[in-house]
Image (cartoon, rainbow, N blue to C red):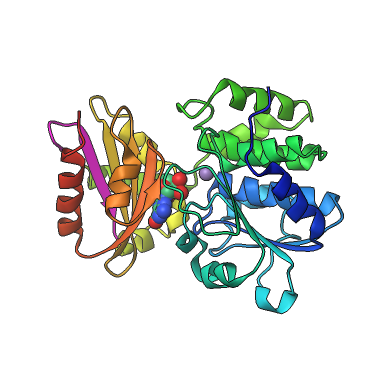
Amino acid sequence: MNRKIENLEKFKEYIEQSKNIAIFTHLIPDGDAIGSAFGLAKLLKKLGKKVKVYLPSNLPEEYKYFNILDYLSCDNPLNNNFDLLIATDCGAYDRLGDYSKYFLSHSKTIVIDHHISFEPFAKLNLLSVESSSASEFVYDLICQCNYEIDKEIAELLYLGILRDSGGFMYSCTTPHTLRAVANLLEYKIDYENINRYFMMRSSYEKTMLLKVVLNNLKLFLNNEVVISHISMDELCMNKATIEDTGGIIAQILSIDKVQVAVLITETTKNVHKVSIRSKFEVDASQIALEFGGGGHKKASGFQITGKIDNIITKIIKSIEKRLV
Ligand code: 5GP
Ligand code: MN
């Protein structure tokens, strides 16, 4: 059954009126950011549009698995005369990093998102909090516009759904999600390889980071909260990057009794990226919002400046109010 999409006609009209389109997604892109942005890029190309994708951070190596480099652009988008800009998987304008200002200043923009903390920032804001992922929402948009996907598009959208739903295990996985996945499998995508490559693989550097995270790990609030951190020095010593931290938090959340897991990674001196995961009732997005970030009920994050001990104290206070 189709999900009702508000402003579907407007979306179609924007696409059909445009010839030269730029797609953006969020800082430190994850599988859903990559899947939704490049999946949509390939679809637009099939529709005969000129299309480029701009990433506000480097493309993590693993995504070179997909045939997407031809779409990726590093030039100045201002020099391209784009008639439409689209942002995917972005709940707030500042998630576009250095492209935020340009995006806000353009006269024709669309954002396609699924975050509960969404703050509209485009001319046409498409939000579906029922979707497991921006990729699931992009899939719905494509289907309801009667556009045709192909195997390469299906693989990218599958990646996004797979990663944001935690391999179809998180509560954001719905019957609708699984029906979308079933349809994507009809395109004979290589899901076994994608599952193995994106869900069951770790680099040596990432495995060594896990060692750091376990070393620095502490339990708080009756063992219901686990917090760990990685300093810039520890990243450097292990020849790891911020991208290598993805997925580690799920391992510490798995500890028995733990309701909330927090992983704090120092990105530049005293500037930290904080990831929050919640297993049960605590709303992780509310904690992140308190610190100027956002996300979902079960996964959220924010950036913060300060000394690690002070940050941990503040985060514990915020979680304590919300523990049930
Ligand atoms: P992660 O911990 O994997 O980086 O992020 C988990 C979720 O929180 C993602 O859905 C992401 O969009 C959101 N998130 C992470 N960092 C930020 C941030 O600084 N601002 C906002 N608004 N959302 C964030
Ligand atoms: Mn997402």
Residue 188 locus on image (x, y percent) = 78, 29
Q: In which quadrant of the rendered view does residue 265 lie?
A: bottom left
In the rendered structure, the answer to whether residue 222 lies left or right of residue 183 reads left
Question: Quick one: quadrant of the C terminus?
Answer: top left
User: Residue 92: percent from the left, percent from the top?
Assistant: 47, 56
Would residue 95 be found to the left or right of residue 149 on screen? Answer: left
Q: Residue at x 64, y 46 (%)?
A: 36
- Numbered marks: total: 0
Q: Residue furthest right?
A: 48
**How far across and how far down the image is residue 23, in percent?**
66, 59
**Highlighted range, magenta:** 220-231
Q: Is residue 319 magenta?
A: no
Classify residue 108 by image quadrant. bottom right
User: In this view of the protein, which residue sits in the foreground, 207 or 58?
Assistant: 58
Q: Is residue 54 visible?
A: yes
Residue 268 or residue 17, whichever sits in front: 17
The front one of 272 and 119 is 119
Which quarter of the rendered picture does the N terminus lie within? top right
Residue at image location 52% in from the left, 59% down from the top: 121
- Residue 30 placement (x, y as % from top left): 53, 49
Q: Does the magenta portion include 223?
A: yes
Apparent side of residue 204 relative to residue 73 in the rendered image (left or right): left
At 45% across and 51% down in the image, what residue appears?
244
Is residue 66 in view from this perspective?
no
Residue drawn 46% across and 28% down? Answer: 170
Quarter occupied by residue 187: top right
